[in-house]
Image (cartoon, rainbow, N blue to C red):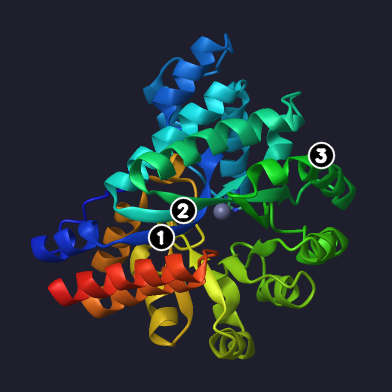
Amino acid sequence: MISSAPPTLPADLRAFIEALPKTELHLHIEGTLEPELLFALAQRNKVELPYASVEALRAAYAFTDLQSFLDLYYAGANVLRTEQDFYDMTMAYIERARADNVRHAEIFFDPQTHTERGIAIDVVFAGIARALREARDRHGFSSAMIMSFLRHLSEEDAFVTLDAALPLRDQYQDLWNGIGLDSSERGNPPEKFARVFARCKELGFHLVAHAGEEGPPEYVVSALDVLKVERIDHGVRSEEDPALMQRLIREKMPLTVCPLSNLKLCVVDDMANHNIARMLRAGLAVTVNSDDPAYFGGYMNANYLAIASALALTREELLQLARNGIEASFIPAAEKARLGTELDQYAAAH
Ligand code: HPA
Ligand code: ZN
């Protein structure tokens, strides 16, 4: 288990991180399914699991690369059957996020993981959206939904998914504002999805894509040039291409970096070698995110604490990371300004 409480961090810095107002821009809702809830849903839906206990399942979370994780992540999603299941999973995430002082979250969901199993796309949208709307109304927790295509499937499949989702657009216009691209990166370059992303752009969606997690920096370039994305998810391998790094700085292109994910999936061998601090110090618009927190050992605070400890981040650097998250978010200007003011007040008070 990765420690979420690095022992070397001074208590005051730890408290500073925990109370810091945050935004989360890279979070797969299916990756928030904790083993306890996964078991409870399996029981509720009479789904047999190949694990004897919650502990046995958690012990299986020892990944060697992205694919070894994805295999378990897709298998785990099999317990999600009803609108209530999607609601319960989303509500559990919101509670964890609120405990970490996350103010705004932009949430990936993968309809193809569910429609492939015969679950109607309406069920997926409805369950997630009901939880997000409740959290907004009760707690002022703001959020957005980013529908993501699975890149190991075909572009035609992505078009089918888009066509199935578009009739729901009006009903979810308060939440669904983005399109993403995830799953197995190597061998599935962004350009495979050029036409469907072009269509989504015409339709007025915000566009993002995973690139440069396991894949080469060329995939980051084609995500920018071919897909026309507004943020790069992960992007840590961009550092291998100095010209790309200069471009990312110049264009103020946000990278949604996920430190504990990178460690768990062996994208980095040690948090002390993670490049988020180098990229931040070089002037890139890097942000901190939790990706699939139920699988990677921690939510937002755990990610901030892990990098602060391993990379000796200062308060100013931590504030900059939080500020980058607000700037990179897809929220109306007034809401952005409100979050910015809250962060300014936090900085002034600490
Ligand atoms: N990378 C690619 N696909 C994913 C990830 C990720 O980190 N998490 C969930 N699907
Ligand atoms: Zn991801």
Tell me whether the residue at label 1 lies in contact with that at label 2, contact meaning CB atoms closer than 8 angstroms. Answer: yes
Indicate the position of residue 332 as horizontal and vertical percent values: 52, 66
Please indicate, yes or no, whether residue 61 appears anywhere in the rendered image.
no
At a point 10% along the width and 64% down the height, the residue shown is: 12
Left or right position of 346 against 77? left
Q: Quadrant of the N terminus?
A: top left
Using the rendered view, name the quadrant where residue 193 is placed: bottom right
Locate ligand 2 by image quadrant: bottom right
Tell which of 252 and 344 is nearer to you: 344
Q: Hey, what amino acid is under mark 1?
A: Thr
Q: Hey, what amino acid is under mark 3?
A: Ala
Say the numbered circle drawn on residue 164. 3
- In this rendering, the answer to whether 249 lies above or below 136 is below
At a point 32% along the width and 65% down the height, the residue shown is: 307
Indicate the position of residue 155 as horizontal and vertical percent values: 86, 52
Q: Secondary structure at mark 2?
A: strand
Say the numbered circle drawn on residue 23. 1
Residue position for label 2: 105
Q: CA distance from mark 3 to mark 1?
A: 30 Å
Q: Hey, what amino acid is under mark 2?
A: Ala
- In this rendering, the answer to whether 253 lies above or below 236 is below
- In this rendering, the answer to whether 175 lies above or below 25 is above
